[in-house]
Amino acid sequence: MRTISTREELCAIVPPDDLFARYAVPARLHGGWVLGGAVAFERRSHSGRRNLATWGPRRDLGRLLDRLIADGVLCASLDHVSVQQADAEVLRARVPTADGSAWDWMATATAPAPTPAEARVVPLDDTADAAELQDLVDRENPLSEGYPGTGRSERWVGVRDDGGRVVACAAVHRLSSGAAHLSGIIVASSHRGQGLGRATTAVLTRDLLRSEPVVTLGMYADNVVARSLYHSMGFVTDKAWWSCSVLAPDGSGAGRESACS
């Protein structure tokens, strides 16, 4: 096993079409490790929590995990460990884990086609509209990661109904790599089927791609409707992750937060 410290080193090891390595990994790594074709790096969430992401050929991945465990890197002090969904058992066979969550990381470099509903999309404000956005989140999807009113989002767009109430929204965040990341995409249940999710996503994606190489997003793997929508707009699933916390020998583990961001 050897260590690496930069995204450039990581990208020299993984296949050239690995979008996650190129666009979701920060330029400088808190820690990085390589064994054969398997790689791992430590990433920090927006709240400072420590997460470990690792992937590669299964045989090499198992050997790398063994070394990371022996060296004390892969342990209960991490908040999350992410492996590809197909390799969840490789991790589970080596350390006790809490129940995990499956999620997809997607990216696109292709501007989506315009849709009729885009005429209804208007700018929203992270501060002025925070209460209304949070109300939509609380009613429709408490797991949403837009975090209105916190300053995390650099841009919001949405749709208002005839009474002026926000019934759809989407936000832009920045990953630790600097890449644009769509989040907080919500449509009120009373207004679904009108193309509003597609419209808000398309507006932001097209605008961002005028000046950026890719747009990324994350979604929970059980949302088959969302996956179909994003794939139809040109997003590709680059990593299908399974994230969990590692338990200590006494069964305790670190606190958990959503791993999609």
Image (spheres, rainbow, N blue to C red):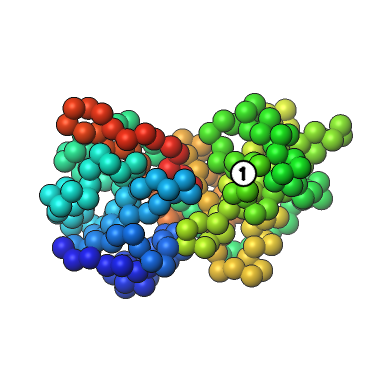
Label 1: element kind = loop
* In the image: residue 80, left or right of residue 164: left
Location of residue 41 (image quadrant): bottom left
Q: Out of 208 and 256, give the one closest to the viewer.
A: 256
Q: How far from the left and from the top, in percent, is residue 235?
A: 54, 55
* In the image: residue 27, left or right of residue 113: left
Q: How far from the left and from the top, in percent, is residue 11?
A: 35, 69
Q: Out of 18 and 49, give the one closest to the viewer.
A: 49
Can residue 232 be seen here? The reply is no
Mark 1 lies on residue: 150
Q: How far from the left and from the top, in percent, is residue 188?
A: 69, 32
Up/down of 78 relative to 137, above or below:
below
Location of residue 134 (image quadrant): top right
Up/down of 6 relative to 232, above or below:
below
Give the amino acid at mark 1. Thr
Q: Out of 60 and 123, give the one closest to the viewer.
A: 123
Give the class, few, some or many, for how many residues have Cα within 10 Å of label 1's Cα (few <14, many ≥20). Answer: few
What's the residue at 18%, 55% (across, down)? 64
* Quadrant the N terminus occupies: bottom left
What's the residue at 26%, 45% (across, down)? 87
Query: Count of labels shown?
Result: 1
* In the image: residue 73, left or right of residue 255: left
What's the residue at 16%, 41% (across, down)? 94
* In the image: residue 160, left or right of residue 222: right
Can residue 122 be seen here? The reply is yes
